[in-house]
Image (cartoon, grey):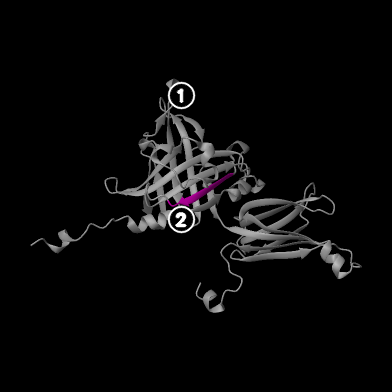
Amino acid sequence: MVPLALAAPYDDPFKRDLLILTDWFEGEFDNSEQVWFENFDAANIPEEDRSKRIHTTHMRLDLPQFGDHVFYVEEYIDNDPTQIIRQRFVTFESDLEANAIRMKQGFFKDTEAALGGQNLGGLTAGDVFFIDTCDVFWTREAGQFVGGMKPKACVFGEGEKRRYSVHDMTLSDNDYWRVDSTYLLKDDSFYLGNKPNRPSKMRKADRFTCDITFRPEDMSLSFQEFREQTQEVKGLSIHSEGGEFSVVRDSDGQSFTYLMREKEYPFYDERPDFIYFSVKADGANRSSVYTVNDIESRRIGVQSGGIGFNCHRDGYEFRELKSVLDQQ
């Protein structure tokens, strides 16, 4: 007779944490608020120590040949999607020997073909390569996950420039903090990236879809003329962490920039959290119109001076039943 405990199949102790970690990892992240705060006079942070603006997208992929938890990572800086600084092919798996969750970072042989992560359905093992010494190991610490490489394991470069990578991360359901730095192997001196104790503090971004209108302000127009002269632009996407898009008004060629920011003012102790949405004519000193909304708002809209917008949080259904909403 085999004891029941020995006969039972071994259960992966990281199975549940894998689901939580990869659920939190999926999505878009941006450090817009960190950049705003560090450039605010009251923060008193030297210019040379201020963070660069970073936006990263972690897109889940259905590629079971690589594993159950697979992602495409694409990152850009300075609020410019053309300035891409990182493309990775990432997988997560349990590592019982390391007593952690292992994140393998793959590199694309053809980075141009992988842009946007939309053409990876036929990806094969020959299209990417991995550097095992640069794997990241994640462990749970209270209500968050902490990840990092093994000390001085990820080494590259030649001669005096031979260096090692430090890739430390902290991830919760809404925040993603990361230190991405290199140090010279000869003397452990800082070389490039995040300065010591200066992580990039990114937050998870939500997506909104917006419809924009420009209406004539001439009150003498007939209803038909009013409709004919109303300009509508539909289905524009914007994210909540400093996302922007621009629209040109056909009637006079004026361009307007629309901005959404989920604010967390550190200086206030009354109602410090809100969603700010503004419309600013290019070249103007101040916004044409703006609105302040509850942090959980699913619809944001305003009409003022012929400028209108109506945005809804992606995933929100217009005709949701109250009984369903009450359960959320």
Task: Categorize mark 2 by other alpha carbons within 10 Å: few (<14), some (14-19), many (20+).
Answer: some
Q: Which mark is residue 161?
A: 1
Q: Secondary structure at mark 2?
A: helix
Q: Amino acid at mark 1?
A: Lys
- Residue 163 coordinates in the image, percent (x, y): 43, 28
Does the magenta-highlighted stretch encompass residue 60?
Answer: yes
Q: Secondary structure at mark 1?
A: helix
Magenta-tinted stretch: 54-62
Q: Which mark is residue 70?
A: none
Is 67 drawn above or below residue 135 in the view shown?
Answer: below
Q: What residue lies at 61% left-to-right and 40% top-to-bottom?
A: 82
Sequence-earlier tag: 2 or 1: 2
Q: Between residues 320 and 160, which one lies in front from this camera angle? A: 320
Does the magenta-highlighted stretch encompass residue 287?
Answer: no
Q: Is residue 240 left or right of residue 189?
A: right
Q: What residue lies at 57% left-to-right and 42% top-to-bottom?
A: 76
Q: Amino acid at mark 2?
A: Trp
Marks 2/1: CA–CA distance: 36 Å
